[in-house]
């Protein structure tokens, strides 16, 4: 399976994996249920899945989902975006900046004096 999934499709899988229904996802996205069903249909076709549950399973097996809750807003979330070839969301970009500030190697004393 080498299908490229859009961020929205991955989010759909993550939400399904948390047990959300199509109606709940439609509400969260401020979309019509029919539009969510269109997303789901395209996603199932890409993954070769027969049902939404099958799609979640295939996505886990393919490493698209790791089966753990998706974290946002820190270094791990940022890296997860990058691993998937996504543009990190603002929340994760901010978390990554804080991470880099925290991880910054302290300047050498002689550099600090400069
Ligand atoms: Zn994020």
Image (cartoon, rainbow, N blue to C red):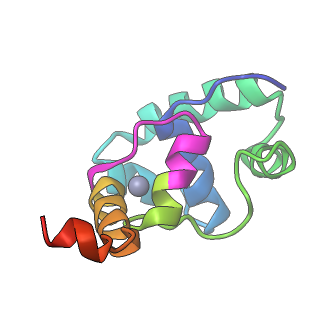
Q: Is residue 63 magenta?
A: no
Provide residue 62's location: percent of width, then percent of height.
Answer: 83, 42
Whether residue 32 sits left or right of residue 12 in the image: it is left
Whether residue 11 is visible here, answered yes or no, is no
Measured along the vertical axis of the image, is residue 89 above or below residue 108?
Answer: above
Q: Quadrant of the N terminus?
A: top right
Provide residue 58's location: percent of width, then percent of height.
Answer: 84, 44
Provide the residue span drawn in magenta. Answer: 79-90
Quadrant containing ligand 1 reads bottom left
| Quadrant in the rendering for residue 41 | top right
Residue situated in front as seen by the camera: 66 or 59: 66
Whether residue 57 is visible here, answered yes or no, is yes
Provide residue 81's location: percent of width, then percent of height.
Answer: 51, 46
List the single residue furthest toward the left: 114
* Residue drawn at 70 percent across, 53 percent down: 65
Figure disc tally:
0
* Residue drawn at 56 percent across, 52 percent down: 80
Whether residue 36 sits left or right of residue 49 in the image: it is left
| Quadrant in the rendering for residue 94 | bottom left
Whether residue 59 sits left or right of residue 41 in the image: it is right
* Residue drawn at 45 percent across, 34 percent down: 34
Q: Quadrant of the C terminus?
A: bottom left
Measured along the vertical axis of the image, is residue 19 above or below residue 9?
Answer: below
Measured along the vertical axis of the image, is residue 62 above or below residue 68?
Answer: above
* Residue drawn at 55 percent across, 38 percent down: 9
Residue situated in front as seen by the camera: 98 or 52: 98
| Quadrant in the rendering for residue 37 | top right
């Amino acid at each position: 399976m080498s299908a490229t999934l859009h961020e929205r499709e991955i989010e759909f899988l993550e939400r399904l994996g948390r047990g959300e229904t199509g109606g709940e996802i439609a509400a969260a996205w401020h979309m019509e249920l029919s539009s969510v069903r269109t997303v789901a249909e395209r996603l199932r076709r890409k993954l070769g899945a027969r049902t939404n549950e099958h799609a979640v399973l295939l996505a886990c097996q393919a490493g698209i989902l790791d089966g753990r809750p998706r974290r946002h807003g820190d270094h791990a979330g940022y890296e997860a975006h990058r691993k998937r070839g996504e543009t990190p969301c603002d929340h994760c970009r901010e978390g990554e900046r804080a991470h880099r500030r925290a991880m910054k190697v302290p300047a050498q004393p002689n550099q600090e004096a400069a």
